[in-house]
Image: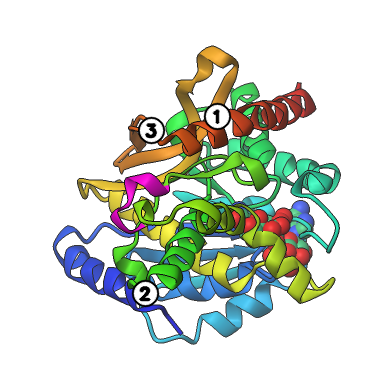
Amino acid sequence: MFARSALRSLNQSRQFSSSAARQTKVAVLGAGGGIGQPLSLLLKIDPLVSSLSLYDIRGAPGVAADVSHVDTNSEVRGYPADKLDEALEGVKVVVIPAGVPRKPGMTRDDLFNTNASIVRDLAAAVARVSPEAHVLVISNPVNSTVPIVSAVLEKAGVYDPRRVFGITTLDVVRAARFLGGLTGSDPKDTRVTVVGGHSGATIVPLLSQTENGKSITGEAYEKLVHRIQFGGDEVVKAKDGAGSATLSMAYAGATFTHKLLRGLNGEKGVITPTFVKSPLFADQGIDFFSSNVELGPNGVEKIHPLGQLSASEEKLLAACLPDLKKNIEKGKAFVA
Ligand code: NAD
Ligand code: LMR
């Protein structure tokens, strides 16, 4: 079920891990859900994960029992609703897909009222039990939930901006797949940097920075950008009320987690877009932004600048910034 690139990457890290051999305890909060279940499975077969702690208000012990039979070395334990603190003990990486997904006609921001408090409470538990953990946020709206997690950790006096990430990898995965589909190239050779945030106009693909991407112009370019920005809606519509992307998101979540683990283990040159506390647009009051980030032993090692943008990308960026600013401010105001 694994895509070739994931298998290749896992094989590389098998070789890497045999020399570096530093493995990690990872928790999934929301492990019983549409994303949480396949994500837990993919983390079970990640050789850089030594122990998996699966928590949900519903069904995590069952998912853990099931996943634990997969023939890799890692330990798996499931925790029910009242055992959140136990689930977080000794954990180095916490992945959060807890929360409600969209139905047709909703925006990600429509999820704020429900998901903001879920994420806030989970972040408070991380601050209490595993304050040095790296927190990887999947729950939408990511543009607001990452500022919420950051503000909760800050209030608790344990915030290190190098350790909080919004997972925007699904946008990168989609961009590679959609561009590959148009140009006939293998998505593995079609890496696209996607910057900004994770919703509609805040998703800014930098196609001009990819050899294949440069060749797409005019109407084809407009359509491709729209598809990358609104790929989530395609899935929400097709699922017709049964939720949003789960399988591709689990793949994206496992891919990002694996990259972070490689960085934490000391591998150099692990660079990927992710939504983090960022200086790039802080002078415009936007202090979270997704751009290429080098991951290292402490989490965020280096935030890369955007590089050269085409005139069309400058326009996309101009449309992104005001929306992103509003989303970030909404998250901060919720905690304040
Ligand atoms: P889902 O409803 O299938 O699963 C969510 C799970 O969270 C459920 O099992 C639920 O019991 C659990 N949960 C609810 N409150 C909880 C709490 N307080 N503690 C622990 N667990 C709790 O939803 P899903 O399809 O898995 O989506 C989850 C979230 O991920 C949604 O907000 C969705 O919008 C988001 N998402 C983000 C991306 C991204 O690119 N970042 C992609 C897809 C989906
Ligand atoms: C996605 O991009 O698929 C997710 O953010 C889920 C959604 O609501 O579209």
Distance between mark 2 and mark 1 Cα atoms: 35 Å
Depth check: give the residue in front, 108 or 22. 108
Residue 131 on image: x %, y %: 52, 36
Q: Amino acid at mark 3?
A: Leu
For discs 1 and 3, the disc positioned in front in the rendered view:
3
The residue that mark 3 highlights is 306
Which one is earlier in the sequence, the residue at label 2 or at label 1?
2
Quadrant in the picture for residue 257: bottom left
**Which segment did they paint magenta?**
207-212
- Label 2 packing within 10 angstroms: few (<14), some (14-19), many (20+): few
At a point 64% along the width and 42% down the height, the residue shown is 201
- Specify the label residue 288 is tagged with: 1
> Residue placed farthest to the front in the image?
218
Whether residue 294 can be seen here: yes
Residue 227 in magenta stretch: no
Residue 128 on image: x %, y %: 62, 37
Distance between mark 1 and mark 3 Cα atoms: 14 Å
Distance between mark 3 and mark 2 Cα atoms: 27 Å
At a point 77% along the width and 69% down the height, the residue shown is 237
Depth check: give the residue in front, 96 or 319. 319
Tag 2–tag 1 contact (CB < 8 Å): no
Residue 232 on image: x %, y %: 66, 60
133 left or right, relative to 242: left
At a point 22% along the width and 61% down the height, the residue shown is 21
The residue that mark 2 highlights is 184
87 left or right, relative to 241: left
Which one is earlier in the sequence, the residue at label 1 or at label 3?
1
Q: What secondary structure characterizes most of the magenta part?
A: helix
Tag 3–tag 2 contact (CB < 8 Å): no
